[in-house]
Image (tube, rainbow, N blue to C red):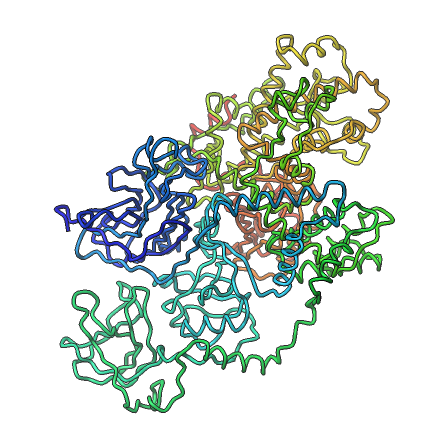
Amino acid sequence: MSSDNRCTAFANVGFTRGIHYWEIKLETASEPGTIFIGVSEKRGMAKLKQWSGCGFVNFRATSASGAERIYGQHFHNGDTVGVLLDCDAGRLSFFLNAIKYGEHILNDMGVAYENTSPFGFNADGCGTGGAGEGAPSLAESYRGGRYLANGIVRPKALWPVIGLRHSSDRVTISEKWISSSGYESMFLVKNVLAVDEMLSSYYGDRSSMLPKWAKREGWNDFNRWQSTRWLRSQTRGSCQTPLVSMGLDIDFDTSAVSCALACALLGLDEVFLSGEFVMIKRSAGRILEMPEEAVVLGVYQERLFYRIQSQRTEGGSLREGGGRAWCFDESEVVSEGVSRISKSKAAGIYLPRLQRFLGMPLQVVFDDGAVVRSDLEIDDFSSVLCTVAKGEIISHVLERRVNSCGVVRFRVLHGDFEGWISERIRGGNEDVIVEKISGVVAEENSVEVNVQGNEKFLLPEDSAQVWNEEFMKRTQYVEDKEAIKIEFSEEEYENALDKALINGLTCVESDAFLVHAVTAVSDVLPCGNALLASFNEIASALEHGISLISEGVVKKSTSLVATHLVAASLFKSLKPGCKVPLVKDMMARISMLRAFNRRVLYGLPFVSTKPAQEGSAILGGTHGFGTGLDRVGRQCNVNNWVDVPSLAKSLRDHRNLIFSSVKRTLFDSIIGATTTPTPLNHDEYELPREIRTVRINRLKARRAAGSSKKKFSVFSQMRHEMRSWSTSALRRSYTAKGHGGQKRAFKVKLVGEGVNDYSGPYREVFTDITNEVQEVNSDGSSLLDLLVPSPNKISDIGDRRDLYVFSSSEKGSNPFSFNEMVEKSLGKFFSSVLTQTMREREEGLFFLGKIVGTACRHSIMIDLNLPLGLVWKKIAEEKVLEADIIREVDVLGRKSKEEEIFWFLASQQRLLNFFVDGIASVLPTEIFSLFTSEEVEALFCGKRDIDIKLLEEVVEYEGYLDSDPVIIFFWEVLREFTSDQRKAFLQFVWARNRLPTKASDFEAPFKILKDNKILKKGEAEGLPSASTCFFSLTLPNYKSKDLLRTKLSYAIENVFTMEQDFITNDTEVGEGWRM
């Protein structure tokens, strides 16, 4: 060691390319900050006497140069730290598996260092935050290491390193690791070219001109998809921001024999099959105080992987990385550390144990004897039971295991004690404690009666084969009767691709319908992703959907499967004369579209969505410099416009051929890459100082009247509080501990209300603002003069009677009434002639756009009823007819003068520009050109109607069962509520009035808790209460449905403040009510 007692240990393998993840278990740290975990180059023996490279040291990212910053979390003895080295993207990240205050923490701590690439290239977005999260650069110097053109790039290899400070410090490199060689850059380029080739084949409706590689990949995907053997999932080595790095997503083998082989290697005597639910009581050498429910995924590299489904904690671990797949080791399955909790076809079938797990008589040879401990692990939670003296023979040896620290241990019976002893002393000379005695007959209670006479299984394949033979006999291996099997030769498959086209539709329209059908069905599946939906789920939905159409049964019914109803409604929407192909042909075509979308997914990050002519004075000619074709085409002559073929144009033209989940993944990736980094606070449970507090007085806003109502509105207060903020502050996405996983850009202080902002008040202000902008005064004027009811809403006619348009006229006047034509005509081109009212309106819409964009960035669905043609189609840059726009907002608008209609649309376009500019300051609006208008609206607003079935899919009960009468009453009452009552209920329990579009988009489950308050004799049941921060409802055990409806209705209609956390002092109450 060096003079400051530091030393570094290098691993025996280094990396120059690819993506690699490994874990380090901290056994003993003499004091905080004495263990360093990271990567480094090898630069001679002198570097071993100091910490080398860069890495993680207990709440700090530290480099050998001495520079450090606050990062991650504190770790302690027994915790496990995962290291993710992405050589291709040039980033170093860390993952923490820890126990804090009895709570199991699984946390992806994000990027610690960037520009760690062994070849020195800079990943796009690094250095300024984004996907690099503001991490410091590992490059030695700015000029020589950041860009290739600024200096010589020196190739290097990075090696895993561990730095220690005291001789008593001890760590273990876990046997759990995964690694990938990554992708060649040429492969990524060829993938983009292949996407371009595929999209080009759709022009001119040349269905027979599909590239050969597309048919071949479709054929391979069809067979792999139908086999149901493979399941893809993220792992702990996957990138926190999707598509920023290829990550370590894995295809798991779900076959029964593979699961048996993996279980044999774990020393289990039973097999956990893919899809089964298990209860986990051990993790990384720790016994969990609160067991966790997980689902078995499958096998990769002969290891059994699982994904945690639910934790009985509020730490948000599943959203911070705990919901990613990881594998078991043999130390985690001992003493019922993992147990099955679901029905299984493999139950009761014995899996022979491998010889290395079997017990064998032992003799103590260590002078000080052998210590028998209560647990497999050697830590403070493992008590000493007894000591076996030297020379004694232990004949009751139950099993042999290796614990999480790599120590060989034996479970023994000695006297009245059952416990564990070690084979060797840990550290020093590794002295032997016990030795095996061969050829000795064990006693009656031992695992083996005669050591030499039993059949032994040395290889896991032998054990798995014996189990599989018995499994096939007992289950008779009958194929699932509901499974749909389609047999194709490759030639038949190619013919089916042509047969799958729907008669009456073009090739593009037919494929777009299939893409829409797969997306719609996937949205109601647990996976929520078209690329992850199973073959049988999609095929069954299509088959039953067609049968429901033929039977004439297309209506909502609790007895019908949701996917079948969705498919049936889609087939019913086809125009008359369209002939639906056979299901087997459609599945063939869908497999080809899946393979194509997988290429699109990995190609989109490298493609610009902006057409070639946009921003080009040459290609744009004299009528389009700086604007897109769709934009300029609405107001100028485009005869001189050169519409240049490009991949961006092809993507826009064929946006309907891309799964919504693929677009959403790209959107989430860009959101993550454009997030403003937020440094951590020294106290990890306190918000960083960059998360500023916004003071909102809702009591004053509700009491205001007349002209002061707008002045004291939540919208105006928020605008005043943020008057000096830069838009980068709203691009923060900080997730605080204990806040239910809610991302935030600021903290909300509700003046006069006794509530802490654990995310409920944060969501509440967004809802309050959207309600205010759509609020109408008693005289019919708009409260904020930003949005006004559409003529259809005022007259209560038309299909959509809930829409609002931008307030383009003075208060109280009709949107189509224009008295100052000249001023408005000039105002279109010269802002100097605008009135003060118009300026305030434009600035207000700009701020509203920022609020709406912030809500979308933080997954807060808002109830903003804006027209599809007038707003969302314009944002998505879809083509729309003026007649359709007018019909949507004013059925009688066709009777208006043509000039009035023209100027109405022009003013709406002008105001929309300000609204979109506000959104663009927070969100990447350019990406919306890949979405359809319906998809863009869903991104911001979620589902218009409150889907009770969707709520039921994400509910968790504590103290109740789903069969309890009060729970049955609750769901029946909720279904009987009106749309407004359902929105009020959602506002009551979650501080928002729109639901996400699918179950997989929920950040937290909806919890219904039993109210255990003991009632006095004659005391009536109280009202239900809610915690908006944690999306929970505390429900008394009402005896009747009518009583539940009365109490719940009263609660949701009469609660206007949040006062659950603390008693507000008199001064603050006075401020809240003072005008």
Does residue 1043 appear anywhere in the picture? no
Does residue 817 appear anywhere in the picture? yes
Residue 762 pos. (x, y %): 51, 36
Residue 114 pos. (x, y %): 38, 40
Q: Nearer the viewer, residue 503 or 789?
A: 503
Is residue 466 depicted above or below 299 in this figure?
Answer: below
Is residue 535 depicted above or below 821 in this figure?
Answer: below
Location of residue 470 by image quarter? bottom right
Residue 737 pos. (x, y %): 41, 44
Q: Residue furthest left?
A: 3
Is residue 152 depicted above or below 948 in this figure?
Answer: above
At x 40%, y 49%, the residue is: 17
Q: Nearer the viewer, residue 621 or 648?
A: 621
At x 41%, y 37%, the residue is: 122
Q: Is residue 956 left or right of residue 75?
A: right
Q: Is residue 201 left or right of residue 29?
A: right
Residue 677 pos. (x, y %): 42, 35
At x 65%, y 39%, the residue is: 651
Q: Nearer the viewer, residue 97 or 669?
A: 669
